[in-house]
Amino acid sequence: MRKRSFIIMTILGPVLMAALVILPVYLTSLSGGNLRNVAVLDETGWFFQKFKDQENLHFYYVTTPLEQAKANALVKDNLLLYIPRPSLNVPVNAELYSVSQAGLDVRSYIKMIMKREVQNRKLLAQGIDPNVIKSSEVSINLLTIKVAANGDEKESNTDVEVGLAMFSGILIYFFIFMFGAQVMKGVMEEKTSRIVEVIISSVKPFQLMMGKIIGVAMVGLTQFLLWVLLTFVFVGIFQAGFSGGQFSTELSKLSGQKTSISHLQTVGASDNNSLALGQVSELLSEVNFKTMIFSFLFYFLAGYLLYASLFAAVGSAVDHDADAQQFMLPISIPLIFSVAMTGVVANQPDGVLAFWMSMIPFTSPVIMMMRIPFGVPYWQIALSSGLLLITFVFTTFVAGKIYRIGILIYGKKVNYAELWKWLRY
C-alpha cells in the first residue's frame, strides 16, 4: 500500500469511474447551446412546414437549385436536407448535406417526420383517416410482481435486476483475476529473487502462503472501498459545483432520452428532473441492497481466497510468466465460462443451469452474484456459501502441499506429473 502505483491507481480508479458519469453530462451541457440551421429543399412539396424547430435545430425552407442551396446553406455547422422528386414512387429518399457529421438525433428526427407523412398520405389514398389509426395506438404498461410464499406481493423491475446482475458478476470476475494475479506474481518474485529462502527460516511455508493471500485480499478490499467512496465524492463535488442543479437535469435527459418526437421536444427541466429521480429512487428501493452488499463482500473474499490459493500454487511451481500459462488455463476456465453464461443466467435466473452453477464453488462467486438481484432463497445462498468455504479449505490444503515444495525448486520445467508427485509427498 506504500507503493506509488497503489496510491496512483487508488485515486485514478474513481476518477475514471466518475468520468463515466460526469463527461457525458458535461459534454452535453457544452453542446446544448449550439444551434444548427437546417435548410430544407423539398421538390415534392409533401413536407412543407412539417419539420418543427427543436431545442438545437432550426428548419427553414428554400426553393433555389441544389448547387446554389448547398453553397448558401453549408456554413459552419449548418445542414441541407434535399428531398428529390421521385419519378414514379412516393418520396422515400432524401439526402442530408453537412460540413461536419450530422448527429444521430437529427437523422432520427428527419426520418421519423418523413415516414409519418408518407404513411399518412398513403392511408388517405386508401380512404383511411390517419387520425383514426393514431387514436387506436396505445402503450402497454406491464408490471412484474413477485408473490412470496406467505402471499406478500412486491413489484420488481427486470431491467434494473439484469443491470445489477451483470455488473455484480463481472465485477467479481474482474477483482478475482486482478488480485489473484498479484498473489501469483508476488510469489514468483520472491521465489526468483531467493527472498523466500530467508523468509521460510522464520515461518512455515503454509503460513507464508496464507499471509500473502490474506494480505493481498485486505489490500484489494481496501482499494475497492476507497474506489466506491471516492467515486461518490468526486461525483458529488462536481454536482455541487455545477451551476443551478444543471447536472441533475442533464443526467435526467440522458437517462430518459428516446428517439421519438415526444422525447425530442423540449420538456420542463424541473419536471423532467423530479420525474427521473423519482423513478430511479422507486426502482432502487425494490432491490435488497443489504443482501447484495453482504453477498458481494463474502463472494469477493471467498472466491478470491479460493482462486488465490491456486494462483499461489502456480506461482510457486514456475519461474517465469510463460511457464505459468499451462497451469493458468485450467484454473481460469470456470471463471471464463461463468462470464460467458451471463446472458443465459440473466434470462433464466431460476433455471436448473443457473442453480447448479451457483452451487459449484468454482463458478458460484460470479453466478450467485448474478442471481441475487432477482431474489434467491436464503437457503440457496447459505448452501452455496458453505460449499464455497469447504472447497476453499480443500484447495488451500492442496495448494499448500505444492507451495511448500515449489518455492524451493529452481530452473526445472514442472509438469502435471511432477505436481502429482508433490501432492503425494
Image (cartoon, helix red, strand yellow):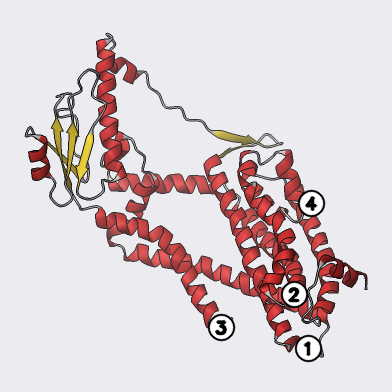
Dot 3 crowding, Cα within 10 Å, few <14, some 14–19, many 20+: few
Position in image of residue 41 (x %, y %): 13, 33
**Is 159 above or below relative to 384?**
above
Residue that badge 1 annotates? 197
> Which comes sooner in the sequence, label 4 or label 1?
1
Q: Disc number at residue 413?
A: none
Residues at marks 1 and 3, CA–CA distance in whole angstroms: 24 Å
Callout 3: helix, strand or loop? loop
Question: Residue 203: x, y in percent?
Answer: 81, 86
Percent across and percent down for residue 250 are 33, 52
Q: Which mark is residue 318?
A: 2
Q: Is residue 139 left or right of residue 408?
A: left
- Which label sits in the foreground, 1 or 2? 2
Labelled pair 3, 4 in contact (Cβ < 8 Å):
no
Q: Nearer the viewer, mark 3 or mark 4?
A: 3
How far is the residue under mark 4 from the one under mark 1? 41 Å
- How many other residues sit within 10 Å of disc 1, few (<14), some (14-19) or many (≥20)? some
Residue to which mark 4 is pinned: 383
Residue wearing tag 3:
3
Quadrant in which residue 327 is drawn: bottom right
Residue type beneath disc 2: Val
Q: Are marks 2 and 3 in contact (CB under 8 Å)?
A: no
Determine the CA span between mark 2 and mark 4: 35 Å
Amino acid found under the numbered disc labelled 3: Lys
Query: Going 81% across and 75% down the picture, which residue do you hit?
Result: 403
How many labels sit on residues?
A: 4
